[in-house]
């Protein structure tokens, strides 16, 4: 059984500056992310500089991510599909075999997006398979519902079944996190137990949530008061010991990468305080460092 690494998300365009500052805190993996486009980034040059910064250290790039809408390709998303292709072709230069992001979404219901999803990701899955790369979809709703949304159709387990039926490729799966299910009042534990057994959990984001059940009971979920907040692990409601145990029982050997910059308390000048607490908390939840048995 391989150790599950604990890492964090890093802006790909700023990775060369940030990684040397983050490495001393003890992160074991980094997920490099781009918003809508890889922009003017020379991805090949970035790979060389990133790998140089990780040389002789037991740290990996867990995945490359592009978060945009590859299905419409409109406006600021015009380069999203090409960015998926760019990252797929460059993944191995970063030492990873995983590219992740949103599925994208067509206007209207999730059902209305499936034809375009099948066209776009059917081809991307083939390109990725040829390159020896896997694709994973983050489970963030981005404010969408089943009927309406602008970003992502992969936020509900019924939608996941539709996606994997539409493109039945072994190299497509999920970038899962409990937070995005909890904001929909879904219990993440039985869901993870079910889905890890499918082999479709390719990467895990370390983001938690706090649900104010007193607010839900008094005002409901459409009232004037917030009832849920995204949290850094260690500050939310999720039992991460259970999550790590379920992942291990299911044979998961990837990473949990903390998705920061969401916590309502540990934010701004307290951001890294919260992230490093989350890092050390998750390491404790996995049982600490590996210790060999006596011989």
Image (cartoon, rainbow, N blue to C red):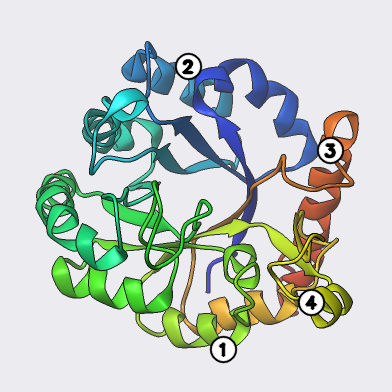
* Residue 220 horizontal side relative to residue 194, left or right: right
Residue 43 sits above or below residue 257 on the image: above
Q: Tell me, for residue 216, which label it has, or none.
A: 4
Q: Are marks 4 and 2 in contact (CB under 8 Å)?
A: no
Distance from Cα at disc 4 to Cα at disc 1: 22 Å
Q: Residues within 10 Å of mark 2 (few under 14, many from 20)?
A: some
Q: Which residue is mark 3?
A: 267
Helix, strand or loop at mark 4 = helix
Dot 3 falls on a residue whose secondary structure is loop
The vertical placement of 252 against 46, above or below, is below
Could you say where residue 81 lies in the image, as x and y percent from the top left? 23, 35
Answer whether labels 3 and 1 touch (C-beta < 8 Å).
no
**Mark in front: 4 vs 1:** 4
- Does label 3 or label 1 sit earlier along the sequence? 1
Residue beneath disc 1: 190
Secondary structure at numbered mark 1: helix
Q: Residues within 10 Å of mark 1 (few under 14, many from 20)?
A: few
How much space separates mark 1 and mark 2, taking CA atoms?
Answer: 41 Å
Q: Is residue 124 left or right of residue 222?
A: left
Residue to which mark 2 is pinned = 49
CB within 8 Å, label 4 to label 3: no
Task: Provide residue 123's location: percent of width, then percent of height.
Answer: 10, 48
Dots 3 and 2: beta carbons under 8 Å? no
* Residue name at image x 75 percent, y 42 percent: 26
Tell us which disc is closer to us: 4 or 3: 4
Mark 4 Cα within 10 Å, few/some/many (few <14, many 20+)? some
Label 1 or label 2, whichever comes before in sequence order: 2
């Amino acid at each position: 059984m391989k150790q599950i690494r604990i890492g964090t998300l890093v802006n790909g365009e700023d990775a060369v500056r940030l990684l040397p500052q983050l490495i001393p805190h003890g992160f074991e993996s980094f997920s490099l992310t781009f918003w809508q486009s890889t922009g003017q980034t020379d991805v090949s040059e970035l790979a060389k500089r990133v790998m140089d910064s990780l040389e002789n250290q037991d740290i990996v790039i867990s995945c490359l991510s592009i978060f945009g809408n590859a299905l419409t390709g409109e406006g600021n998303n015009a380069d999203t599909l090409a960015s998926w292709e760019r990252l797929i072709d460059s993944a191995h230069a970063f030492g990873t075999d995983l590219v992740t992001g949103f599925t994208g979404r067509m206007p209207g219901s999730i059902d209305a997006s499936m034809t375009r999803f099948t066209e776009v990701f059917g081809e991307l899955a083939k390109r990725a398979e040829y390159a020896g790369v896997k694709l994973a979809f983050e489970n963030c709703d981005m404010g969408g519902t089943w009927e309406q949304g602008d970003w992502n159709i992969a936020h509900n387990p019924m939608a996941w079944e539709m996606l994997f039926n539409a493109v039945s490729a072994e190299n497509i799966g999920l970038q899962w996190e409990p937070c995005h299910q909890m904001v929909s009042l879904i219990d993440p534990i039985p869901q993870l137990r079910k889905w890890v057994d499918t082999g479709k959990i390719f990467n895990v984001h370390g983001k938690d949530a706090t649900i104010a059940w007193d607010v839900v009971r008094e005002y409901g979920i459409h009232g004037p008061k917030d009832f849920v907040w995204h949290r850094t692990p260690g500050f939310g409601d999720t039992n991460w010991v259970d999550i790590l145990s379920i992942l291990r029982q299911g044979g998961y050997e990837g990473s949990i990468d903390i998705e920061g910059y969401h916590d309502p308390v540990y934010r701004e000048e307290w951001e890294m305080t919260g992230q490093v607490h989350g890092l050390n908390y998750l390491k404790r939840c996995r049982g600490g460092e590996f210790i060999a048995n006596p011989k």
